[in-house]
Amino acid sequence: MLESIDPLTLAQRYHDAMPIRIREYLNHRGIIDDAIDLHLLGWNGERITIPIFDRDARLAFFKLAKDPLDRGQGPKMLVPGGTSAELYGWERLRGKPPRIVICEGEFDRLALESRGIAAVTSTGGAGVFRKEWTEDFLGIPEIYVCFDRDLAGTRGALRIARWLPQIRIVELPEEVGPGGDVTDLFVRLEWTRDNFLRLLEKSRPAPVDVSAAAPTRIASKAAGNRDEVDAVKSGLRIEEVLARFMRLSTSGNRFRGHCPFHEDRTPSFVVYPENQAFHCFGCGAHGDVLTFLMQVEKISFREALERLRGWADQPNDRTA
Ligand SMILES: [Zn+2]
């Protein structure tokens, strides 16, 4: 019987069946009625149903949250077996908002959305973020990662930075306590939208870790010469060095061009002056000015460093 029902119809049916007490519970978790209705949250008789839509706007599966009256040991969230992690909030990315927050759970996302703050989350939690999701973030000027205040959250944010180096990392304030999350801010600490926007202003860029992306052989050498590298890098602007090898056009406070490392028609190569890094959304090439030079000229670490040092001494020489 159930198999014959279109999933969207089922979602609507669950939505219509949501008892008042569940709606009130969600309100107490900072999720307003409009968000409950828009995102078709529902009730299957045992658990709260959260329909998860895939990139093509098809209903992929339901995430099932525990009944607040259920005092048993069962998991707070259930995912149907056999499903892989999905991004919750594709429709938000399509709208290309001026900023987006990647947070750590479906309810956190909905609490943010309830305050008019565009947000997405991975249904796999802080530990799962797929590289193939990143291209949909192209064209969104500000991307924040705001995970729970714990080790898994910190690690998860750094993982995302490997694919999306332009992210800014938001640290939840100490008041949320260990393991505290976005919902705690709005519910327990009674934060407003403005409070949260001010927290975003205090975010910091993701650390550029060359060793995370460069081949190991390069990374170990580079790591041993970190001070020397930093000294040379600080005398250069990454966009000026890269402009010797490729055409770059400005795009907000970033630069963009056709990737020299793969057949790139889009252009999908982005330069981030603020953290002196580049990232290609087509082939995943990623690094700093030094790894760029080594790879594009196929030269050694030492040779690249020497050449950069020469350019750093004569910053206006564009003809090299
Ligand atoms: Zn590329």
Image (cartoon, rainbow, N blue to C red):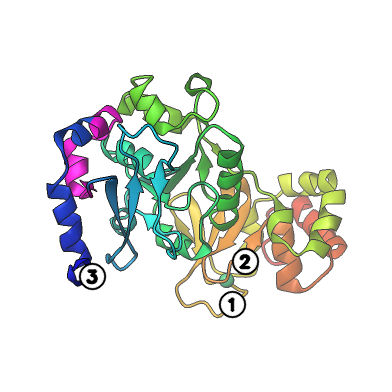
State the residue position of label 2. Answer: 285
Q: Secondary structure at mark 2?
A: loop
At 49% from the left and 19% from the top, the residue drawn is: 175
Q: Are marks 2 and 1 in contact (CB under 8 Å)?
A: yes
Q: Does the Cβ of the disc 2 residue fall within 8 Å of ligand 1?
A: yes
Answer few, some or many: residues within 10 Å of disc 1's Cα (few below 14, many 20 plus, some between 14 and 19). few
State the residue position of label 3. Answer: 3
Residue 98 in view here = no
At which x and y percent is residue 59? 28, 63
At 61% from the left and 37% from the top, the residue drawn is: 151
Image height of 264 relative to 26, above or below = below
User: Is the N terminus in the top left, top right, bottom left or bottom right quadrant?
Assistant: bottom left
Image height of 150 relative to 281, above or below = above
Q: Does the Cβ of the disc 1 residue fall within 8 Å of ligand 1?
A: yes
Q: Find out whether residue 38 is within the magenta segment.
A: yes
The magenta segment is 25-44
State the residue position of label 1. Answer: 262
At which x and y percent is residue 138? 42, 59
Residue 130 in view here = yes
Left/right of residue 52 with respect to residue 308 in the rendered view: left
- Say which of marks 1 and 3 sits in front: 3
